[in-house]
Amino acid sequence: MTTTISRALCSARLKAALRCEHRLAACTRGAFIASATTAPPRRPSAGHQLRHASSSSPSHTSSRPKANYVTTPIFYVNADPHVGHLHSIVLADVLSRWAQARNGGWSSSLAEESPTKAILCTGTDEHGIKVQKVAEATSVEPRALCDRVSGRFRDLADAAGAGYSRFIRTTDKDHVKAVEHLWKALEDAGHIYKGSHEGWYSVSDETFYPESQIRPAQDSELTAQQKESNEAIMVSTETGSLVEWSSEENYKFRLSSFQDQIIEWLETNSRAVVPQVRYEALLDEVKSGLADLSISRPRSRLSWGIPVPDDKDHTMYVWIDALTNYLTVAGYPWKEAGGTHSDQQGCWPPDSMVIGKDIIRFHAIYFPAMLMALGLPLPRHIVTHGHWTMNKSKMSKSRGNVADPFESIRRFGKDEIRWFLCRVGGNLSNDADWSEATLLEFHRKQLQGQLGNLASRILAPKLQARLVEHAKRNDHRQDGKCVVGKPERTFEASVVDTLQSLPARVDEHFKAFEVHRALEAVSEAVGEVNEMLQRTEPWSTKICTDDEAGKVVYLASEACRIVAWLLKPFMPTKMEQLQRELGLMGEAVRWEDLGVLRDHVILRTKGEKVQPLFPKID
């Protein structure tokens, strides 16, 4: 009877997901949701009193602002990194840099001036059957394999210019300690019990599948040995991976008892998961029913992992191990940091958790339920992005359509790749197609042709020399330096309005996690300024007087100043170069003053040619 009910529940859950416009993708290591025995009665716990993220943090009060905390997923080390991993790293880094620039590193709801850096964490998930099997197949120790591949992910974060505060590994000693503490806390509160489980299990996917998600294998999917066996071979409909019937005993987390609380949290926090399409799909999935979650594997099958406390025959599974990393970075367990809930990093809960759409269930259902059980605040925003495809097909090494992120950064440039990933992949609702031709076109038209061209035009030695001579003749100086002053308000009023309103418009897009629209707004503003230059031709002594040329260069210079500040989270190196050419290095700019046009712009007295901001890419 239990098996029938559980399978019916899985079927209902699948149908509910299919009704969504964008069904949540099954994760490689999906939920343990096949048939299970009835759970024993649970003991009451104080954790059930927690409802949603509005609860106060373990350490923060109104007198102590919370540092902004952004996370990437921790990446599984069974294979080298690809462009999708780079996308997650860059998006999280951009959000973190924006928080640092916009709010001084504090969480947006508690913003105040501070030199404190925003906290960004990334890292690697290093335990599990896949790692164990790859290590066995390549005759290396699991730790050695993890060291090598984890190093590649760290190299990628460095190559991308990510300003991470910590690169965490699930093999780190403090993380193991945090995981063990979390397990005991859940167990002591009655949220963990031991039960038996059977179903169709995929070794490669590390998950049990319900019957609704398996099918007979086709001949083309079978090896010669499998064909000769004449046995019925079943595979996952989602991944095509081989599945086999398995039965075992394991520990379970009482996920089902948190269904109503998760629904309430989602319904009262409509921005808890973005974009909206995935929020709606997730809410439908939770409403369709949640089964208790297997959180261990027999140690005889999974030896590469953290043993269950007080039971060395079982290994903790990914739901407990990997998800705890976000707490580890924040200093968990806080009770051991001086006898109080002292949040060592002053950053819990996360402000933005950046993840791929295929792991939304784990971060937006399993993890919140565990936090509820512990009485801890929930993440403020879970930011889910789509996948990168190539020629409209999902990247796959077997298909030979994987873009090497290291080679892409080497060829096209770190900042250019960061900009492209956010400009094209920043529309979180959709998958994005990786195309070098598209990248080159965007670079030529928008970076080189618009922003790069604007900077080169207004900083051209001939034009600057002309304006310097005009300033000397008319004694237009400030602190001994030649300047052009702010023109009257009616001069190019439309351009002035665009520049003054641009920071607020970009900020609104960041609040909505629309980084692609933030970049579009900046590009449109740059385009409008370039149109002004084309129309007025300040470089021409026949068309534009010295006085008019000064006014145009003033507005164009102010545009570059504002744009450099707004684009610095996306392109930190290039925008620092632009600020240096504009003579702005070392200037502290308050957010409130960014859109306020200055009284004057200092002219360049050096006659050397400015290096192109975005050189041509062959």
Image (spheres, rainbow, N blue to C red):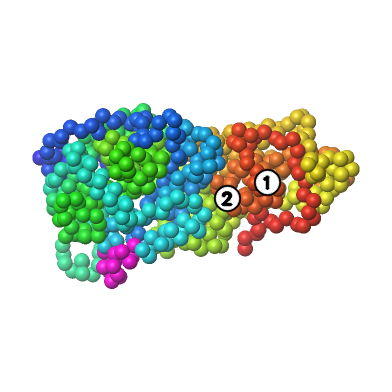
Q: CA distance from mark 1 to mark 2?
A: 14 Å
Q: Look at 75% across and 29% down and name the residue there.
A: 489
Identify whether 22 is placed above or below 432.
Answer: above
Asked whether residue 373 is drawn in magenta, I would say no
Residue 346 placement (x, y as % from top left): 41, 40
Name the chief secondary structure element in magenta.
helix
Identify whether 174 is placed above or below 593.
Answer: below
Label 2 neighbour load within 10 Å: few <14, some 14-19, many 20+: many
Q: Quadrant of residue 62?
A: top left
Residue under pointer 2 = 572
Residue under pointer 1 = 584
Asked whether residue 135 is drawn in magenta, I would say yes
**Which residue is at the front of the view, 40 or 11?**
40
Q: Look at 26% across and 68% down and name the residue there.
A: 136
Amino acid identity at mark 1: Leu
Left or right: residue 459 versus residue 122 is right
Residue 316, numbered circle: none
Residue 285 placement (x, y as % from top left): 30, 37
Give the label, 1 or 2, closer to the camera: 1
Q: Look at 82% across and 52% down and name the residue there.
A: 462
User: Given the current orientation, which residue lies at the most extreme front position?
Assistant: 338
User: Given the current orientation, which residue lies at the most extreme bottom position?
Assistant: 139
Q: Secondary structure at mark 1?
A: loop
Residue 251 placement (x, y as % from top left): 17, 47
Q: Secondary structure at mark 2?
A: helix
The C terminus appears in which quarter of the rendering?
Answer: bottom right
Q: Look at 26% across and 62% down and name the residue there.
A: 132
Residue 215 placement (x, y as % from top left): 23, 53
**Which residue is at the front of the view, 344 or 186?**
344
Q: Earlier in the sequence, mark 1 or mark 2?
A: 2
Amino acid identity at mark 2: Pro
Tell me which segment is drawn in magenta: 133-146
